[in-house]
Amino acid sequence: MQKTDSNNKLNDFNEEIDLIEIFNVLYDGKWIILTMTTFVSLIGVIYSLMLPNIYESKALLVSVNTSSAISGTLQRYSGLAGIAGIDLPNSEDISNSAKAKSKIQSLSFFKSNILPNIQLQDLMAVKSWSPITKEIIYDKNIYDKKSNTWVRDYSYPKQQIPSAQESFKIFISKHLSISEDKNSGFITLSIKHQSPFIAKLWTDLVIDEVNAFYRKKDKTDSEKAVSYLKQQILKTSLSEIKLVIAELLQDETKKLMLIEANEFYVFDYIDPPDLMENKSEPKRSLICIISALLGGMLSIFVVLTKNYFFNKKSAKF
């Protein structure tokens, strides 16, 4: 029994691949390895050179506290007003900055606030950017700059001129990026584009538009609240309720003043976007290194497969 086990172990040992044998096989196939590695590396180099330079303009932002004291006043006096039969306006204690991060990435914001303020061809038809002339070169198969017309081939549901929904998908997936540092609460908003000028322009645009959007929204809401409270103060004869409404009116008036005075209503700059001189991508050296590694691994696999699979298969016959 022990003799049988020893024979089995010996057979298993003989069947194991010898490292020296592997080295000899690889040495014999060195020209295959060198050729394939060089070929794949050249493909990586050519591919990296074909990729356009991308510039990224970043803005580091801090949330501006625009919450009004009216929410506290409402909580203090809502019960008293209810007894008198007066419904005070609701005030949500959710900061605009928390809502703005989602708003920026919404189709409605892009359609109403971004798309009307950019040139669509800068989003959907860019081929390259010339650092010498500082001009964008458009893909002639998509957009004809001379006639200012769209000439791209399309099929349903796409249209000749890219729709807001199609453009939004490109804007969100390839250009816009927004993230928040959970520790500090700081927000990083960035735009990537082949033109560093467009990257900075669009970064400023997004921030300006979201500030303007919530400034206008809060101003409208406050004006409606003032009108409502003025109506309610005429409906009651109770002096206590009139004092409550008067305080609410005062708070809303202060809020309106702050809305008009604050230039940065939702987000303020810690570090504003700049016109970048250096590209952010592609990482051409990294692409070349990865392609060389892939070429080497592929060539080694081919040499070993050729030796241990095809040669042994031929030997059986």
Image (tube, rainbow, N blue to C red):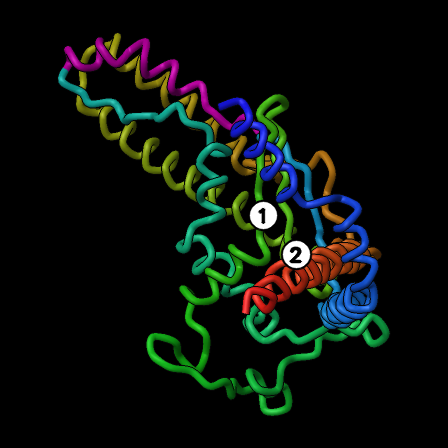
Q: Secondary structure at mark 1?
A: strand
Q: Looking at the rendered structure, which numbered label has been put on residue 249?
A: none
- In the image, 239 versus 99, the foreground residue is 99
Residue 264 left/right relative to 110: right
Q: Quadrant of residue 65?
A: top right
Q: Position of residue 220 (x, y in %)?
A: 39, 41
Q: Position of residue 288 (x, y in %)?
A: 78, 60
Q: What amino acid is labelled 1 in the image? A: Ser
Residue 67 counted in the magenta span: yes
Q: Which residues are magenta?
A: 64-84
Q: Looking at the rendered structure, which numbered label has been put on residue 192?
A: 2
Query: Is 77 rendered above or below residue 29?
Result: above
Identify the residue at image location x=29%, y=26%. Answer: 90
Identify the residue at image location x=83%, y=68%. Answer: 31
Q: Position of residue 92 (x, y in %)?
A: 35, 26
Sooner in the amino-acid sequence: mark 1 or mark 2: 1
Residue 251 counted in the magenta span: no
Residue 176 left/right relative to 227: right
Identify the residue at image location x=52%, y=32%. Answer: 257
- In the image, 214 versus 152, the foreground residue is 152
Query: Is 300 rendered above or below residue 14?
Result: below
Which quadrant would the C terminus be assigned to in this image? Answer: bottom right
Identify the residue at image location x=59%, y=57%. Answer: 175
| Disc 2 residue crowd, few under 14, some 14–19, many 20+, Cα 10 Å | many
Majority secondary structure of the magenta segment? helix
Q: Secondary structure at mark 2?
A: strand
Q: What amino acid is labelled 2 in the image? A: Lys
Q: Specify whether residue 305 is in view.
A: yes
Q: Quadrant of residue 299?
A: bottom right
Q: Which residue is mark 1?
A: 177
Q: Position of residue 266 (x, y in %)?
A: 55, 36
